[in-house]
Amino acid sequence: MGLLSPALRSPAPAPDMTALSNFAALRGQLRVSLGPACNIWCWFCHNEGDVPPGATKDDGSLRPRERLLCADHYVQAIGGLIATGLRRVYFTGGEPLASRLARPVLEGVARYAAPDVTFALITNGILVPRALPWLQRIPLDKIKVSLHYFSDATFRMIARANRPISDVLAGIESAREAFERVEINTLLQRQNRHEVPAILDYALTRRLPVQFIELVSTDFNTPASDAAVPADDLVALLRTMCESERVEVAGVGQGRRVFTVDGVEVEVIHRELGRHHVGQCGTCPLKPQCVEGFWALRLDHAGGLMPCLLREDLRLHLAPILTARGGLGAAHAVARHVAAFTEGTL
Ligand SMILES: C[S@@+](CC[C@H](N)C(=O)[O-])C[C@H]1O[C@@H](n2cnc3c(N)ncnc32)[C@H](O)[C@@H]1O
């Protein structure tokens, strides 16, 4: 205890939970990065706010943050946030299945499974077959596989992957064997424009819900951001194929168009439908570049929690709080942070 700052030694006042509860009620999600390391190097990767694998590959002096959390820290933090009302937990990275913490963290949080709590894994799919013996026992509500490519050539161009696209497709098939809900997610970009119909056809044939997303620009991918492709052409194509289209703008997150094609949901995040902003966004100098709005709390392996991907300066340092006060104490600190972010006083 001697090493703790005076603020962490005294008891914390009870927080006002309103902002965190509202965020949860609006389907706000907790995105948990198990670490920045990945087995592919997508050019666009925002790496949930850390230095992307591609940047580290190109320039060894660019290092991702150092790991401060162990598996038990993650489990405590996630448990605390679920206890204070968050209901949607997404595991991501880097490639979450490339992290040695994947198994202990996912097995550890299984104890928080409840009918109104959902756990989802976002993965590039490659390591799913290898992980399946333990992964299939985790109460995951969905596996979301990134499929931004549909040929070896495009896979190489987008992800600099030195492996065949069949590795990703095998991962999707493996996930389908073990989990009821497997979804595809595809980032629209110039490099895959010619393969979008094939990806769509692949998903529809297998009755896999698919989400098409637009590029979020960050410092790392800005030089190539002219590769961003708006969703308009895809929306026009889907209108020729669908039984129905609805617009979802409720809750946090970006507005999306949801098409039903042969009974399968195809979701398109569409910039023109807007996003959710709160008080802090009012004076944010980066608001003109903001694509996502306030929709996720991102917990990273260095123990930081970011309410906004573009504002590193608004990252909350949870690691010392977790050590001193455990999961519930950390969740209370998050509640205070979210309240201040919502009011615009951070
Ligand atoms: C960072 S990846 C990590 C998980 C896993 N390795 C994967 O490939 O799905 C998590 C999600 O972020 C999305 N993503 C990454 N960079 C993005 C960007 N610049 N704009 C929009 N989405 C992005 C990916 O498509 C993926 O759905």
Image (tube, rainbow, N blue to C red):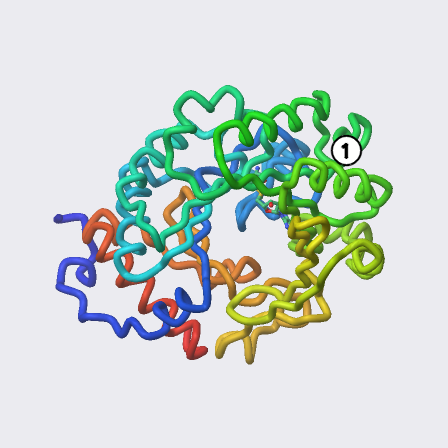
Q: Is residue 136 left or right of residue 327?
A: right
Secondary structure type for disc 1: loop
Residue 310 placement: quadrant: bottom right
Residue at 26% of width from left, 63% of height from top? Answer: 332
The residue to which callout 1 is attached is 150
Residue at 63% of width from left, 23% of height from top? Answer: 170
Image location (x, y in percent) of residue 320: 27, 50
Residue at 72% of width from left, 21% of height from top? Answer: 164
User: How many numbered discs, if any?
Assistant: 1
Image location (x, y in percent) of residue 31: 46, 50
Quarter that holds the C terminus = bottom left
Image location (x, y in percent) of residue 40: 64, 30
Residue 158 placement: quadrant: top right
Q: Is residue 64 left or right of residue 154?
A: left
Mark 1 Cβ inside 8 Å of ligand 1: no
Quadrant assignment for ligand 1? top right
Q: Is residue 31 left or right of residue 188?
A: left
Callout 1 environment at 10 Å: few (<14), some (14 to 19), or many (20+)? many
Give the answer, above or below, for where 115 lies relative to 283. Answer: above
Give the answer, above or below, for where 171 lies relative to 119. Answer: above
In the image, 11 versus 268, the foreground residue is 268
Residue 108 placement: quadrant: top left
In the image, 36 versus 200, the foreground residue is 200
In the image, 314 versus 266, the foreground residue is 266
Q: Amino acid at mark 1?
A: Phe
Taking the image as drawn, is residue 12 in sight? Answer: yes
Image location (x, y in percent) of residue 323: 22, 47
Taking the image as drawn, is residue 217 in sight? Answer: no
Q: Is residue 197 left or right of residue 313?
A: right
In the image, 340 versus 57, the foreground residue is 340
Give the answer, above or below, for where 204 lies relative to 99. Answer: below
